[in-house]
Amino acid sequence: MLQVSVIREQREHIIKGLGKRGLKEAGELIDKAITLDQARRDTQRQADDLKARSNAEAKRIGELMKAGKADEAAALRAEVASEKEQLKALEADLSRFEEELKIHLYKIPNVPAEIVPAGAGADDNKIVHEHGVIPQLGADALPHWELIRKYDIIDFDLGIKISGAGFPVYKGKGAKLQRALINFFLDEAEKMGYREMLPPIVVNEASGYGTGQLPDKEGQMYFVQEDGLYLIPTAEVPITNLYRDVILTDDQLPVKNVGYTPCFRREAGSWGAHVRGLNRLHQFDKVEIVQVREPEESYAALDEMCSYVQGLLEKLELPYRKLLLCGGDMGFNSALTYDMEVYSAAQQRWLEVSSVSNFEAFQANRLKLRYKNKEGKMQLLHTLNGSALALPRIVAGILENNQTPDGIRIPKVLVPYTGFDRIN
């Protein structure tokens, strides 16, 4: 969430930035935060003044008693008792203002970075890079949901039988391809200095609030009512929360973690080819990279993460494009997001396979994730994360783009992991 001090000092800048998201009530949201903060600070000051006066008067009571002025001491004691009741009321008001302010700040999204274009949605995103040649398939080319049926490598009907729609069963070479991609992504991340983590796939409420999934995406997460736990929508949540309430030192930075997890999302898709097959699932596998960096280094880290993801796509021989997301298409927590999309030749459309984001201090403020800078001052760190990569649409792209009369060709870089070079 945004820091109150920043909101006070940069009101106009923040309102202008939130306008890129199409947030019409930005001014109202920011001014209410300032009003609540002022009420909180005024109440805190009154409570501090009253506490200081009561302490001084309590000391004075002792002096009066020693001087034999019992009547004056009794009168002052009654006054102190009254002040204690006033202090209780002020402390109750302070707690109420602090809670109201916290809840209100949760409603305010992150401020887009300067280079983020204004826009309402995907049509306003900017293509900043394209790579690769789009395959030209024959007229008999099949979309991936037909290919997986033809080669019996993924079964949606079995998934529906045991769980429901959006929970596929991977079979034979389909399961091996899935495992090969996971291992390939993890091995490549390790080469780039990322430390592998294997976190829990359920998190508590504090973790959901820490990375901003709560309260913004509460309806999109599966919830275990009896235990108060949420199934994770991405490994970003548990891995970033490893550093909740942590003060890092210089020798612990930068933090570079990678983790593979299954991911779970309740989001319901509309009918149509754009959500068929692997295009949108309730459960899917993903390898996530997470970094924690000093503020002055976070945007260089973002570029590094993008280059890394692009390198993976090039090694997989997939044509892709890089998009700079507009304000209206960015996630609630993000200050700047790049999406990577691969071209699905049989569907003749682009499929998002990765989002790489810099959250600046937005998550760190919720997490209370800090470090001591070179001047010895405590400062919030910046958090970043990226899909590297989400598997379903990668698999869809590999299957569709590499289909031949003799089966589906496996990208060369994966053959050592799969143990076969063709699905047939």
Image: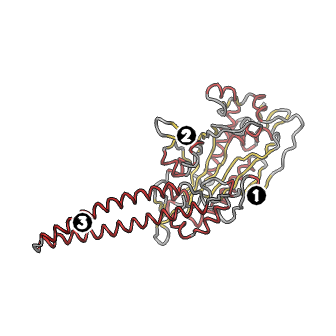
Question: x%, y% of residue 271?
Answer: 74, 36
Q: Are marks 3 and 1 in contact (CB under 8 Å)?
A: no
Q: Nearer the viewer, residue 134 or 335?
A: 335
Image point 84% across, 32% down: which residue?
406
Instruction: State the SS at label 2.
Output: strand
Question: x%, y% of residue 388?
Answer: 65, 48
Between the residue at mark 3 and the residue at mark 1, the CA separation in whole angstroms equals 65 Å
Judging by the rendered image, the residue that carries numbered circle 3 is 80
First in residue order: circle 3 vs circle 2: 3
| Image quadrant containing the N terminus | bottom right
Categorize mark 2 by other alpha carbons within 10 Å: few (<14), some (14-19), many (20+).
Answer: some
As shown in the figure, which amino acid type bears the numbered disc 3?
Val
Which mark is nearer the camera, 3 or 1? 3
The numbered dot on residue 126 is 1
Between the residue at mark 3 and the residue at mark 2, the CA separation in whole angstroms equals 52 Å
Image point 32% across, 59% down: which residue?
88
As shown in the figure, which amino acid type bears the numbered disc 1?
Lys
Among the 4 quarters of the image, the one containing residue 397: top right
As shown in the figure, which amino acid type bears the numbered disc 2?
Leu
Categorize mark 3 by other alpha carbons within 10 Å: few (<14), some (14-19), many (20+).
Answer: many
Is residue 131 positioned above or below 52 on the image?
A: above
Among the 4 quarters of the image, the one containing residue 161: top right
